[in-house]
Image (cartoon, grey):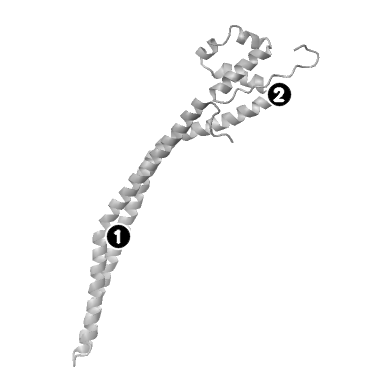
Amino acid sequence: MKLYADDPSHRLRQALGDALVLAWILLWARVAYETHQQVERLGAPGREIEQAGSDLTRRLTSAGDSAGGLPLVGDRLRDALTGASGAGSALQEAGRTQQDAVSGLALLLAVLVLLLPAAAVLARWLPRRIGWVREAAVARRLTLGPDGLEVLAVRALAQRPLADLAALPAGTVRGWRDGDPSAARALAAMQLRSLGLAQGVPAPTTPPGQRP
């Protein structure tokens, strides 16, 4: 699989394009990371609530254990304090819930910040790059096949701008139509050149019974 053209200028344009796309994605990956970090900071109150609930539970439980040693009311007071520690557990759960909500929001925003700009560029860049790789692979195979010269010539006539065709030596198209191998080679080389590929178009073999 050929990823880059043979022609230096064409290959340079491809490399620069790939580098720009990569830089764009890395830039937005950095922005997405910073967004995630900034939103995650909103979870600080939730962590404080969880910590406060944990402290409240621990203190009420400790107080209940201490009160258990009091005469007459010790058991009742211990049970009351231990039961009240459930409020601390509720605070802990509320703090964790808030942190989970903030974490989910941070992740969602980070994904969107990265995905939307990256997808906008990849939707245009990727089909072109894949299309070139496929075209180049097929073109190279055609140069090795018996009918490749004619196929490339027809492709050039169908695709190349009129200005490029007009720049060909006079009579090239007429010569191709009349079966002139050199005209077919010129058109095929033009098509390969448009893809940035080396113009190694083999000379066609002379059919039996015909003079070269």
Query: Which sits in the foreground, 76 or 28?
Result: 28
From mark 1 to mark 2, how far is it between C-alphas? 68 Å
Q: Do the CB atoms of the residues marked 1 and 2 lie less than 8 Å apart?
A: no
Assess disc 2: are there few (<14), some (14-19) or many (≥20) residues with their C-alpha within 10 Å of its C-alpha: few
Q: Position of residue 166 (x, y in %)?
A: 53, 10
Q: Earlier in the sequence, mark 1 or mark 2?
A: 1
Query: Which sits in the foreground, 123 or 80?
Result: 123
Left or right: residue 150 compared with residue 17: right
Left or right: residue 20 compared with residue 146: left
Q: Position of residue 62 (x, y in %)?
A: 24, 81
Q: Residue reaching furthest right? A: 209
Q: Amino acid at mark 2?
A: Pro
Q: Is residue 66 above or below residue 106?
A: below
Q: Position of residue 148 (x, y in %)?
A: 66, 23
Residue depicted at x 36% and y 42%:
28
Q: Is residue 154 above or below residue 142?
A: above
The numbered disc on residue 99 is 1
| Dot 2: element | loop
Query: Which sits in the foreground, 64 or 186?
Result: 186
Query: Which sits in the foreground, 87 or 152?
Result: 152
- Which corner quadrant of the image does residue 212 belong to? top right
The numbered disc on residue 146 is 2
Assess disc 1: are there few (<14), some (14-19) or many (≥20) residues with their C-alpha within 10 Å of its C-alpha: many
Residue depicted at x 26% and y 55%:
42
- Which corner quadrant of the image does residue 98 belong to? bottom left
| Dot 1: element | helix
Q: Amino acid at mark 1?
A: Gln
